[in-house]
Image (cartoon, rainbow, N blue to C red):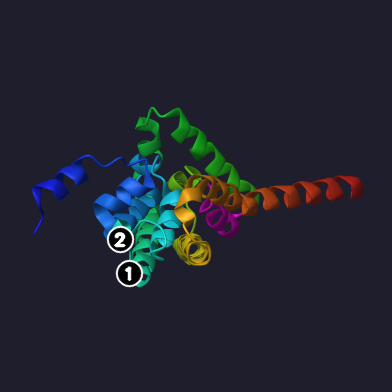
């Protein structure tokens, strides 16, 4: 039964703060946020990386006892939300084309769409779908962009599942591993969240550097 105090805490939730989201909605909220961030353009501002990492951390019980979560249900919720959201975004893009993006006035969203299209053109469908999972905003807009640009459904599904599982389960288990090994780890939560966001960009940066080296080598041979 929902108490007035619990209802008030849900209404007062800060959707930009991972701890606030987890306090109000728990494991179910993780799945909903994953779905919204990866499947609905309106969810581009949601804190996917920090939410997964913080949720994994809170499964250890070494941080905030009042927010202790169960690892098994958390992993299922995170994975299902991330995979279902991406597939939903792809289907929306396939049916609505670029109309959804055209109606949006968000500069950040349009910049993300441009980066998503560049990823698809530069790296090909499979690699772009996987890499986009690790880039905030881009992971929101690439899914409908893939649908609008005619990426084959089979190719998109296979690689969004692969990338989605690595991203959602990897960040969650990363938080759990750190929380299990470091006492009172919640004191260092903010710098660790910043670090995990930076680390999540490494696959993309590595691919950009590799692509540039390959381009230079090709120019020298030409």
Q: Which residue is mark 1?
A: 73
Q: Position of residue 6 (x, y in %)?
A: 16, 50
Tell me the quarter of the image containing the N terminus: bottom left
For numbered disc 2, what is the local secondary structure?
A: helix
| Main secondary structure of the magenta stretch | helix
Neighbour class for label 1 at 10 Å: few (<14), some, many (≥20)? few
Could you tell which of marks 1 and 2 lies nearer the N-terminus? Answer: 2
The residue under the point 33% across, 51% down is: 33
Identify the mark at residue 27; answer none if there is no mark: 2
In the rendered image, is residue 65 in sight? yes
- The reply to whether discs 1 and 2 touch (Cβ–Cβ < 8 Å) is yes
Q: Position of residue 119 (x, y in %)?
A: 59, 47
Check disc 2: other Cα within 10 Å, few if <14, some if 14-19, many if 20+: many
Label 1 residue SS? helix
Q: Residue furthest bottom?
A: 72
Q: Would you place residue 118 above or below residue 29 in this image? A: above
Q: Is residue 52 left or right of residue 30?
A: right
Residue 115 figure quarter: top right
Measure the C-alpha gap from mark 1 to mark 2: 7 Å
Based on the picture, tell me whether residue 133 belongs to the magenta stretch.
yes
Measured as percent of width and height from the top left, residue 164 is found at: 47, 61
The residue positioned 44% from the left and 60% from the top of the image is: 57
Q: Could you say where residue 54 lies in the image, as x and y percent from the top left?
A: 42, 54
Residue 143 visible, this angle: no
Query: Which portion, as a residue range, is magenta?
Result: 124-135
């Amino acid at each position: 039964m929902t108490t007035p105090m619990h209802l008030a805490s849900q209404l007062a939730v800060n959707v930009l703060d991972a701890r606030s989201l987890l306090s109000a909605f728990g494991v179910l909220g993780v799945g909903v946020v994953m779905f919204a961030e990866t499947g609905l353009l309106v969810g581009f501002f949601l804190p996917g990386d920090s939410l997964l990492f913080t949720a994994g951390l809170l499964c250890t019980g070494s941080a905030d006892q009042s927010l202790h979560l169960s690892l098994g249900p958390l992993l299922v919720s995170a994975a299902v939300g991330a995979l279902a959201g991406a597939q939903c975004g792809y289907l929306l893009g396939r049916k609505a084309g670029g109309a959804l993006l055209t109606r949006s006035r968000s500069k950040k969203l349009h910049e993300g769409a441009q980066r998503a299209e560049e990823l698809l053109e530069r790296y090909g469908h499979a690699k772009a779908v996987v890499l986009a999972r690790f880039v905030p905003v881009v992971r929101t807009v690439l899914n409908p962009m893939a649908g609008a640009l005619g990426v084959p459904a089979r190719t998109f599904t296979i690689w969004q599942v692969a990338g989605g599982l690595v991203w959602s389960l990897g960040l969650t288990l990363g938080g759990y591993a750190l929380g299990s090994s470091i006492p009172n780890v919640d004191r260092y939560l903010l710098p660790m969240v910043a670090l995990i966001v930076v680390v999540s960009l490494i696959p993309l940066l590595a691919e950009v550097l590799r692509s540039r080296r390959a381009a230079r080598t090709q120019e020298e041979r030409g």
